Image: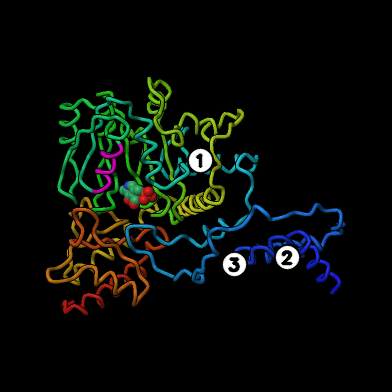
Amino acid sequence: MLLRRFSRKAACRMFSSSATQAGSEGNRAMSASAAAQASHMAAKPIDITAQPVLTMKNLGEDVPIPSVKSFNPPIRLLCGPGPGNAHPRVYSAMSLPQVGHLDPYFLEMMEDIKSLLRYSFQTNNSFTIPVSGTGSAAMEACVANMIEPGDVFLIGCNGYFGKRLVDMGKRYGAVPVTMDRPWGQVFTYEEIKEAIEKHKPKVLALVHAETSTGACQPFDGVGELCRKHGVLLIADCVTSISGVPLYLDKWGVDAAYAGTQKALSCPPGVAPLSFSDRAMDKLMNRKTDVANWYLDMRMVASYIGSNTGGARSYHHTAPISMCYALREALEIVREEGLENRWKKHRDAAEMFWSGLQEMGLEPLVAYEHRLPTLTTIKVPQGIDPKQVTNFVLHKYGIEIGNGLGELSGKVWRVGLMGVNATPLIAMTVLSAMKDALRQQGYKC
Ligand SMILES: Cc1ncc(COP(=O)(O)O)c(C=O)c1O
């Protein structure tokens, strides 16, 4: 009782002028929070009369307190192109107490993340880090750091993300040249060789796992070709890391980027990146500054990139909780083992593909180039694809994706990635799709 009276008095004294003068919604809320603060203060033995009297004369809120709905995200089974569901252990890791981003504990953990990333990428590249941002940030980091103005930049364009690379290349002053293929197909070794010999690029970029089409680009021999012609090789591994065999060193990839929200079962927010020694050479010997301050990997290297034990210098504040999440996701990959992980994705995909066949549905991509992590399914004639995605979302709480770009309205995209790469989820998605298609009179 005494405590309560004391608190109210303290609040009145501190905020007296605002409470009497304004009387607006905002100022009333301010008084309430002041009261809460004062009651917190009251718990400590301080002499309130010795505190200076604050006035609110020049303060006030111009924008009223908004009213918002209660926060209660629905539970969804995320089987679209991404994000997929996060692993429960990853969610738990995100709620662990934060340390500072230059705390020795964080720096030690960063070294673990880097070595776990090297395992998932199958590389010994020393510069292998999580970029702060989503997959596009790591993609832009590759382009911004590997391209100098005037460089010929050869890009494999057989889907949406190849086009994004072209757009980024232009913004960094590259001369983009494209190899084009219908969406859903991949480039042959001969086509790549011919394009390199013809255009003599400084940098070549290929999308390993094209999420817009569901095609998996083979890399055999491409790295050697690039070395022979002095070309740096960039690989987009956003939808392949830990779900599909991926060998940066064996394939001679110089700059790779990936995403966390697909087969790693971690929410989006940080993005794996790895540069080979050749890539680091180009970076360190650039004639021009990297035209992107945030993604300048020379500066980031002196922050989290070096593991030589030297002093780290502040560049930006790393997203601590996202780094915890990534560490846990990568630890799960380590525990499962990459080969098991690749097999698990393959098995779930095979089961899904057999189910599609039984339903008379056809994948867009030929079997030998089909991605296990992401399947594109041709929409049968007379079926409204969006009605199907809406139906499965609202009736079953399952998200599957519609087509993107050129394939909009022509395909569905189903991702069986990370925790969702299981026979149970494959069968669940098939059943939900069957129900949705039958609503539209499709016989299956
Ligand atoms: C192949 C590919 N590259 C790049 C990206 C961009 O990643 P983000 O959306 O995380 O920025 C995506 C995203 O889905 C992708 O699938």
Q: Given the image, on which type of amino acid does mark 2 rest?
A: Ala
- Image side of residue 139 versus residue 228, left or right: right
Q: Is residue 162 magenta?
A: yes
- Ligand 1 lies under 8 Å from the Cβ of mark 3: no
Crowding at mark 2 (Cα within 10 Å: few <14, some 14-19, many 20+): many
x, y percentage for residue 282?
Answer: 38, 24
Label 3 sits on residue = 25
Quadrant holding the N terminus:
bottom right
Secondary element at tag 3: helix
Counting residues from the start of the chain, the first of labels 2 and 3 encountered is 3
Q: Where does the magenta region start and end?
A: 160-168
Q: Which residue is mark 2?
A: 35
At label 3, the amino acid type is Glu
Q: Residue at x 72, y 55 (%)?
A: 55
Residue 393 position within the rendered picture, expressed as x and y whole percent measured from the top left: 33, 72
Q: Is residue 288 left or right of residue 49?
A: left
Gap between marks 1 and 3, in whole Å?
A: 53 Å
